[in-house]
Amino acid sequence: MKNETQQKISKYKQVKKEFTFWLPFEPGDFVQGEITGKFKGQYGEQFIILNEDDKLSYCMPNHAVINSLMDGMKKGDSVRVVYTGEKDTPKGTKMKLYEVYLRENTE
């Protein structure tokens, strides 16, 4: 049975995600690099950024703040996303805050 299963699996390529989710912990944490992809998330498009420092790809959190700041950005744009902390909302919950910077074309 095991060999039969292995033969069936050998016809397939294992699916692996090519990114990890970015989870900032401290204000000032950031990801900086090129947008390499995006996909539809619950609150809008989620962006994947190839980080310049460690050469890993990170998926940005699906937070409305990030999505609104990155609206209109496209694959190939160079950005810096900085976690700036949290604030209390009128509903009594915490909202994560970010700043997003788009690298200017200096050519």
Image (spheres, rainbow, N blue to C red):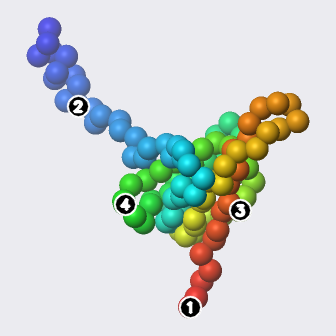
Under circle 2, the secondary element is: loop
The label number, if any, that marks residue 107 in the structure image: 1
Mark 2 or mark 1, which has the lower sequence index?
2
Judging by the rendered image, the residue that carries numbered circle 3 is 72
Where in the figure is residue 41, as x and y percent of width and height? 64, 40
Q: Say what amino acid the circle numbered 1 marks.
A: Glu
- On screen, residue 72 above or below 96: below
Q: Say what amino acid the circle numbered 2 marks.
A: Lys
Where in the figure is residue 32, as x and y percent of width and height? 51, 64
Q: CA gap, disc 2 to disc 1?
A: 48 Å
Where in the figure is residue 37, as x and y percent of width and height? 52, 55
Are discs 4 and 2 less than 8 Å apart at CB? no
Where in the figure is residue 87, as x and y percent of width and height? 76, 44
The label number, if any, that marks residue 55 in the structure image: 4
Mark 4 or mark 3, which has the lower sequence index?
4
Judging by the rendered image, the residue that carries numbered circle 2 is 11
**From the viewer's perspective, is the residue at label 2 or at label 1 nearer?**
1
95 displayed left or right of 106: right
- CA neighbours of label 1 inside 10 A, class few (<14), some (14 to 19), many (20+): few
